[in-house]
Image (spheres, helix red, strand yellow):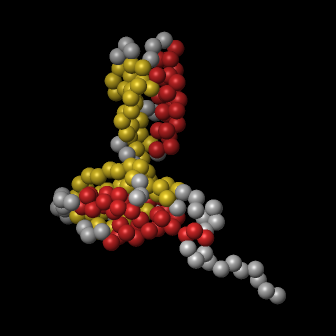
Amino acid sequence: MTANVQPAPASAYDLSPNEQAEQTATFALLVDNEPGVLHRVVGLFAARGYNIESLTVAETDRKAHTSRITVVTRGTRQVLDQIEAQLNKVVNVRRVHDVTRDPNGVERELALVKVRGSGPERVEALRIADIFRAKPVDTTLESFVFEISGAPSKIDKFLDLMRPLGLVELSRTGVLSIERGFEGM
């Protein structure tokens, strides 16, 4: 009896559509806090035609002279694996962690959302903000500025509900990530 075994695809062009489905990935990088490191990381994406959907950078340890870069990008699993491998080769990158593949990964984002509103729309905006635990940080007779934090999908849903009520302006921090547990990156 012969088994119906299919050979592995010879190239990315031979992959089935399901294997080529794009997905989002969040990479956390621990890097030396040196001039030009961010440029090298971003240059890697630009040189290979990869898009960066979100980018956050901050110094994390003055004594160790390190910064953390969090990059959100999209691609097929094969492309995302290639991005991770290339990031590991960048000089001054100490560690690369794919937060989206880690069951202990936590991702959050902060947004400031300006909403115009009076009358019933104003009351509805406050009601929705309360449901989403968005905090009014500024208010006038004609508008609010809400601060909301959480998973990017939560912020997207909040924005979808605020648009018909008078969404005026938006500022997002980009995704931040960290791993649960007692160990650090």
Q: How many marks?
A: 0
**Residue at the extreme front of the image, as rendered:** 13
The quadrant of the rendering that contains the C terminus is: bottom left
Q: Return the x and y of residue 83 as percentages of the image width and height.
A: 41, 65
Residue 145 visible somewhere in the drawing:
yes
* Residue drawn 35% across the image and 42% down it: 173
Q: Return the x and y of residue 166 as percentages of the image width and height.
A: 46, 22
Of residue 139 and residue 47, the one placed in the foreground of this image is 47
The quadrant of the rendering that contains the N terminus is: bottom right
* Residue drawn 49% across the image and 27% down it: 162
* Residue drawn 43% across the image and 62% down it: 98
Residue 127 visible somewhere in the drawing:
no
Q: Return the x and y of residue 22 as percentages of the image width and height.
A: 54, 57
Location of residue 132 with respect to 59 vertically, above or below: above
Location of residue 39 with respect to 144 vertically, above or below: below
Q: Is residue 23 left or right of residue 184?
A: right
Residue 171: name its quadrant.
top left
Q: Is residue 8 left or right of residue 56?
A: right
Residue 170: name its quadrant.
top left
Q: Return the x and y of residue 69 as percentages of the image width and height.
A: 32, 56
* Residue drawn 58% across the image and 77% down it: 10
**Residue at the extreme bottom of the image, as rendered:** 1
